[in-house]
Amino acid sequence: MCSLPHHSSFGVGLVTRKMGNSLSPTVEVTLEGDTYTLTTTSTFKTSAISFKLGVEFDEETLDGRNVKSIITLDGNKLTQEQKGDKPTTIVREFTDNELITTLTIGNVKCVRVYKAV
C-alpha cells in the first residue's frame, strides 16, 4: 500500500490521495517488438503508456499533469524520469513474485508493492 503524505510536493488533494490509497490496481507490462506498454487498471481509472526504451515521449499522468518521460531498463528495474512542473522518478523493480514501485518527487518517496497473479 502506498500512503501519499499530506505534502505539497505531490500537489494532490486530500480526496484524490484517499481514493488512491484505497485502490488495489493491477499493473500489466507487455512487449511487442521494441515497444513496451504499461497498463494500470483500477476501479477508479485505467491508464496505459506505450514507449520505447531510452526514447522521450509525452505523457499525461494519472493526476492530470503533462510531462515528458523517458524510461530505461537496467537488469530487472524500469526507471522512468518525468520532466515537468514536478520532476518525478518512478523505479519499477520486478522480482519473481512482485513488483516494487518507488515514486520520488523532491524529498518525498512513496513505495507500493504489487503481488504477481
Image (cartoon, rainbow, N blue to C red):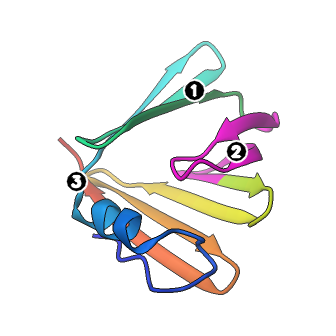
Q: In this view, does 12 lie above or below 95?
A: below
Q: Which residue is painted at 64% across and 54% down in the image?
A: 79
* Percent of width and height locating residue 64: 59, 47
Q: Nearer the viewer, mark 1 or mark 3?
A: 3
* Percent of width and height locating residue 25: 28, 47
What label sits on residue 71 in the rendered view? 2
All told, the count of numbered labels is 3
Label 1 residue SS? strand
Q: What stretch is highlighted in magenta?
A: 54-79
Overall secondary structure of the magenta section: strand
Q: Nearer the viewer, mark 3 or mark 2?
A: 3
Tell me which corner region of the image, top left, top right, bottom left or bottom right, holds residue 17: bottom left
Q: Name the residue under label 3.
A: 24
Name which residue type carries label 2: Ile
Mark 2 Cα shell of 10 Å, populated few (<14), some (14-19), many (≥20): many
Q: Which residue is painted at 55% across and 67% down in the image?
A: 103
Which residue is at the front of the view, 111 or 95?
111
Q: Name the residue under label 1.
A: 36
Q: Is residue 1 above or below residue 5?
A: above
Mark 3 Cα shell of 10 Å, populated few (<14), some (14-19), many (≥20): some
Q: Which residue is painted at 28% across and 56% down in the image?
A: 114
Left or right: residue 42 versus residue 117 is: right
Mark 1 Cα shell of 10 Å, populated few (<14), some (14-19), many (≥20): some
Q: Which residue is painted at 63% across and 21% down in the image?
A: 35
Label 3 residue SS? loop
Q: Report how far apart the C-alphas of labels 1 and 2 lie in the structure.
A: 10 Å
* Residue 12 is one of the magenta-drawn residues: no
Q: In the current view of this chain or complex, which residue is farthest to the left? A: 117
Which residue is at the front of the view, 20 or 33?
20
